[in-house]
Image (cartoon, rainbow, N blue to C red):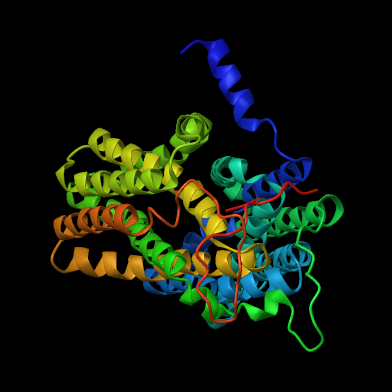
């Protein structure tokens, strides 16, 4: 492929999206560029405050536990309160928590702040995803999610490099920089992003508004969406396992910690370097096929870890499941938007986000227990099996719900099952 063709491909990938989307994209980039807390939290707790590795792991897990509560909370606020106020409030709450970590030193004080930070950081995601679904035309939603995911990883890569270089300033300084970046993100949203929540339709006297007629229980009763959430949970468990199991497996092979640092860096490098190309290749493909293929890539990539014996081989496995990640994340977000009625997009994205948070809390515990017990080979055999099962589930259970043809109308009753959404309408556009 020539340089000119690559340029044309990149131009086509980023063209045609609303201006509002690019302000949201910028806010994601700014936010993640200053994301130092989670990157350096375990080192801060052990090296700076003198806590044990066990306590550091517990605190990081509390961040994930906070996300389990924050995701549905953010979904409800997004639909009832609005996308923009939810984003601004939760960004400011996360910024306050980051700033508090620079001054709170007691063990349980730090744990509480990290728990609240997990709530705030996860609560903002449904509003971001719902905004993308609101303002981007239906045919471009997956592309928009892919671009926002690219911004997230680009910002995280910059944060990792800059944070490592600036660590001599002290962890507390980095946490304050995180707070400033997150506050700037909130300012961008407040000043430049329009509210995109659909107007409530007229209703008869005594009738509840549409967004109040769809409860979280109604969302869970939506059989196709419930299937999508459960399958995503399986994929998330497979995706999370390497972040705990890979360094342990490499250590068993006698490789030094520095080797793991170089191997896992491949994940970010591949995403930053090739997300736009992957997006171009997968454009207009069937979401069911993409989800199935991504699950298989996760299965093969993680499963092959059991066969690796060198840093190069481990890096190759990371490349395989990273490609699966680049395909899966935007496709899953777009599929969620496709199944959600427009007045309940926040709730749907909130429930989907909860599956990521649950996996982030449960998978590290399971991975560590399996490596310490039956062994790492069992862990990778398990991730391979789960990935294959997820791929089969997407193919057999969601082909009809995610078919290419859209229904003309959508009717949502208080206890009815929602099968497919109304196509997203272009509006005055993200994070995943």
Q: Position of residue 77 (x, y in %)?
A: 69, 73
Q: Is residue 164 above or below residue 368?
A: above
State the residue in front, 205 or 331: 205
The residue under the point 50% across, 34% down is 283
Q: Position of residue 307 (x, y in %)?
A: 15, 43
Q: Is residue 317 above or below residue 8?
A: below
State the residue in front, 74 or 199: 199
The residue under the point 59% across, 18% down is 7
Q: Is residue 316 above or below residue 328?
A: above
Q: Position of residue 245 (x, y in %)?
A: 28, 57
The residue under the point 61% across, 69% down is 411
The residue under the point 25% across, 59% down is 386
Residue 367: in sight, yes or no? yes
143 relative position to 47: left or right? right
190 relative position to 8: left or right? right
Give the farthest residue toward the front: 408
State the residue in front, 275 or 211: 211
Number of on-image labels: 0
Residue 114: in sight, yes or no? no
Q: Is residue 179 above or below residue 100?
A: above
Give the farthest residue toward the bottom: 206
Q: Position of residue 113 (x, y in %)?
A: 61, 75
Give the farthest residue toward the right: 191
């Amino acid at each position: 492929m020539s340089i000119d063709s690559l340029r044309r491909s990149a131009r086509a990938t980023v063209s045609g999206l609303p201006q509002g989307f690019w302000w949201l994209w910028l806010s994601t980039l700014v936010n993640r560029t200053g994301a130092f807390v989670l990157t350096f939290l375990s080192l801060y707790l052990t090296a700076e405050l003198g806590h044990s590795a066990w306590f550091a792991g517990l605190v990081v897990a509390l961040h994930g536990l906070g996300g389990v509560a924050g995701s549905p909370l953010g979904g409800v606020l997004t639909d009832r309160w609005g996308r923009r106020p939810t984003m601004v409030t939760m960004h400011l709450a996360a910024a306050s928590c980051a700033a508090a970590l620079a001054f709170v030193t007691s063990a349980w004080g730090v744990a509480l702040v990290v728990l609240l930070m997990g709530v705030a950081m996860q609560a903002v995601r449904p509003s971001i995803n719902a905004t993308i679904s609101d303002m981007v035309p239906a045919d471009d939603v997956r592309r928009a999610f892919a671009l926002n995911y690219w911004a997230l990883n680009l910002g995280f890569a910059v944060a990792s490099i800059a944070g490592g270089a600036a660590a001599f300033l002290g962890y507390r300084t980095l946490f304050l920089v995180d707070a400033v970046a997150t506050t700037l993100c909130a300012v961008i949203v407040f000043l430049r992003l329009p509210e995109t929540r659909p107007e409530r339709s007229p209703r008869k006297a005594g009738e509840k508004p549409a967004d109040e007629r769809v409860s979280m229980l109604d969302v869970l009763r939506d059989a196709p969406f419930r299937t999508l959430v459960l399958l995503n949970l399986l994929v998330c468990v497979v995706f999370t396992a390497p972040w705990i199991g890979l360094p342990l497996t490499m250590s068993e092979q006698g490789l030094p910690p520095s080797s793991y640092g170089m191997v896992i860096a491949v994940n970010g490098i591949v995403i930053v370097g090739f997300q736009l190309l992957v997006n171009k290749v997968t454009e207009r493909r069937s979401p069911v096929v993409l989800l199935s293929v991504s699950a298989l890539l996760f299965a093969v990539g993680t499963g092959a870890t059991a066969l690796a014996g060198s840093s190069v081989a481990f890096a190759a496995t990371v490349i395989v499941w990273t490609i699966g990640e680049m395909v899966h994340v935007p496709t899953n977000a777009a599929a969620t938007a496709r199944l959600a009625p427009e007045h309940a997009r926040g709730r749907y994205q909130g429930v989907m986000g909860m599956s990521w948070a649950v996996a982030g809390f449960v998978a590290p515990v399971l991975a560590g227990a399996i490596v310490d017990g039956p062994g790492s080979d069992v862990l990778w055999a398990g991730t391979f099996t789960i990935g294959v099962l997820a791929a089969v589930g997407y193919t057999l259970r969601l082909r009809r719900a995610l078919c290419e043809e859209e229904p003309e109308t959508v009717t949502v009753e208080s206890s009815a099952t929602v099968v497919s959404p109304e196509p997203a309408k272009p509006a005055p556009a993200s994070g995943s």
